[in-house]
Image (cartoon, grey):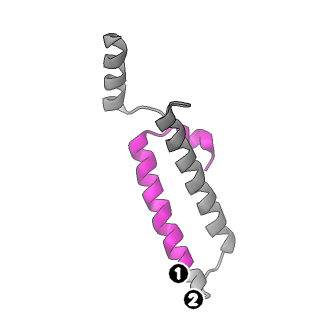
Amino acid sequence: MKIEQIRDMTKDEILQKKAEIEEEVFNLRLQKSTKQLDNPLKLRTLRRDLSRINTALREDELGLRKLAQGSKEKIKAEEQKEDK
């Protein structure tokens, strides 16, 4: 997954994807410990995807780069602009 794809997702979608990846990493680590892991590179790519997601969330939190906004978030952002 590329960082541009992550930034095009809403925050809720990103958090959902993060939970899915964390669960998959956990399962792959269990397979690795029991010597049943078929593709060890899958673990590496998932860890990197998780890092990209965390980076995008942190950038949004710090205000460096904004994530795509869902309908509720978009309305809230527009209201904040009108108040200023």
Where residue 45 appears, as percent x and y from the top left, is: 64, 61
Where residue 55 appears, as percent x and y from the top left, is: 57, 45
Residue at 50 percent of width and 61 percent of height: 21
The magenta region covers 1-30
Three-letter amino acid code of the residue under disc 2? Thr
Can you identify the residue that label 1 sits on? 30
**Magenta span: helix, strand or loop, mainly?**
helix
- When asked about the image quadrant of residue 69, the answer is top left
In the displayed structure, 9 sits above or below 22; it is: above
Q: Is residue 69 magenta?
A: no
- When asked about the image quadrant of residue 65, the answer is top right
Secondary structure beneath label 2 = loop
Q: Is residue 6 magenta?
A: yes
Secondary structure beneath label 1 = helix
Can you identify the residue that label 2 sits on? 34
Contact between labelled residues 1 and 2, with CB atoms less than 8 Å apart = yes
